[in-house]
Image (spheres, helix red, strand yellow):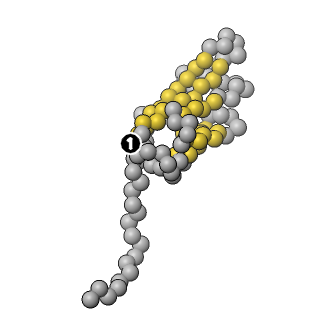
Amino acid sequence: MATLTALSPGSSPVFTATPEPSGSSVGSVVPTWTSSDTTNITITTDPTGLIATVAIGTATPVGESVTVTVSATNPADNSVVTGSLAFTVVAPVAPFPSSFTITQSS
């Protein structure tokens, strides 16, 4: 299992859904993605529906647990297959400075 990078407000991580078992296919079915936070999280997908960009809004509370789910309906029997991933929104990390400004203080 891959390790997630820190996901903070304002970030837009990209996730890929891989059909299981290996060798299976959704065919022409385009999976849909949802988020447990429908107010602060926006999801856009590529044309296949297998790659999603999850935009974490700047108003998303730090510490919030978010679940992202992808689902597809099998046209042969109307069964729904899903996959989910949960993550906790963390505070943004301040970047290391690129220089210093020196001012006289006394």
On the image, the x and y values in percent for residue 26 come to 66, 24
> Residue at (57%, 29%) from the top-left corner?
70
> Residue at (50%, 48%) from the top-left corner?
59
| Placement of 38 over or under 73, stated as above or below | below
> Residue at (52%, 26%) from the top-left corner?
83
Side of 50 relative to 75 (left or right): left
On the image, the x and y values in percent for residue 27 come to 70, 24
**Quadrant where the C terminus lies?**
bottom left
Q: Quadrant of residue 49?
A: top right
Residue farthest to the left?
A: 106
Q: Is residue 3 visible?
A: no
Q: Amino acid at mark 1?
A: Gly
Q: Which residue is mark 1?
A: 63
Q: Is residue 64 visible?
A: yes
| Placement of 35 over or under 29, stated as above or below | below
Q: Secondary structure at mark 1?
A: loop
Q: How many labels, in total?
A: 1
**Quadrant where the N terminus lies?**
top left
Q: Which sits in the foreground, 91 or 15?
A: 91
Q: Quadrant of residue 3?
A: top left
> Residue at (66%, 13%) from the top-left corner?
78
On the image, the x and y values in percent for residue 15 come to 54, 39
Q: Quadrant of residue 47?
A: top right
